[in-house]
Image (cartoon, rainbow, N blue to C red):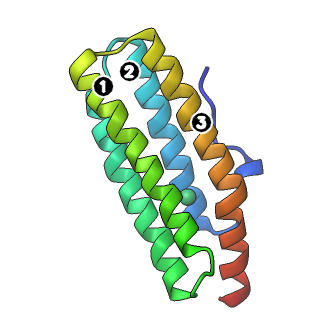
Amino acid sequence: MAMQWNENLAVGVDAIDNQHKGIFIRVNNLLDAMVLGKGEKYIVEIIEYVGVHFNTEENLMNKYNYISYVKQKTEHMLFIKYFFSIKRELETQGVSSQLLIQTHQLLYNWLKSHIAREDKKFCTFIKKCA
Ligand SMILES: [Fe+2]
């Protein structure tokens, strides 16, 4: 069951919203591929894309001296860690239904809670400063 980006997740900074949409598209591509027993190519693509996205956000936070930078950075690192553990499992065990379900829950839960909570806060802050 794919989840799409929706207006409830909008943070109001176009560059960030567009990247978030890009993450959802890539997570959905990954999950579709995993259903077919694949996914290694997509996990690599997501790791690269998410890395660029986190750099964009962290550069903005630094630029405006955002107070919760460390909290954000820690959550970003945790998310990257999830991707690497999925990648390792894909390479060593292949796709199992358990991995598929875990990946689905983990990524969507993290995305929804992080974007709706932390990213909205930080974008509200930088919009006031800009
Ligand atoms: Fe984000």
The percent position of residue 6, horizontal first and vertical second, equals 71, 44
Label number found at residue 108: 3
Question: Can residue 11 be seen at all in this image of the molecule?
Answer: no
- Please, what secondary structure does the residue beneath circle 2 have? helix
Earlier-in-chain disc, 1 versus 2? 2
User: Vertical placement of 57 versus 47: above or below?
Assistant: below
The residue at which mark 2 appears reads as: 33
Numbered disc in front, either 3 or 1: 1
The residue closer to the viewer here, 19 or 94, is 94
Q: Amino acid at mark 1?
A: Glu
Dot 3 or dot 1, earlier in sequence: 1
- Which one is earlier in the sequence, the residue at label 2 or at label 3? 2
Of residue 66 and residue 7, the one placed in the foreground of this image is: 66
Q: Are marks 2 and 3 in contact (CB under 8 Å)?
A: no
- The quadrant the N terminus occupies is top right
> Do the residues under discs 1 and 2 have CB atoms within 8 angstroms?
no
User: Disc 1 designates what residue?
Assistant: 89
Q: For ligand 1, tell me if the residue under mark 2 lies within 8 Å.
A: no
Q: How many marks?
A: 3
At a point 63% along the width and 37% down the height, the residue shown is 109
Quick one: which residue is furthest to the right in this view?
A: 8
Q: Residue at (71%, 51%) from the top-left corner?
A: 9
Q: Amino acid at mark 2?
A: Ala
Residue 58 x, y percent position in the rendering: 48, 72
Give percent across and percent down for residue 17.
60, 59
In the image, ligand 1 is in what quadrant?
A: bottom right
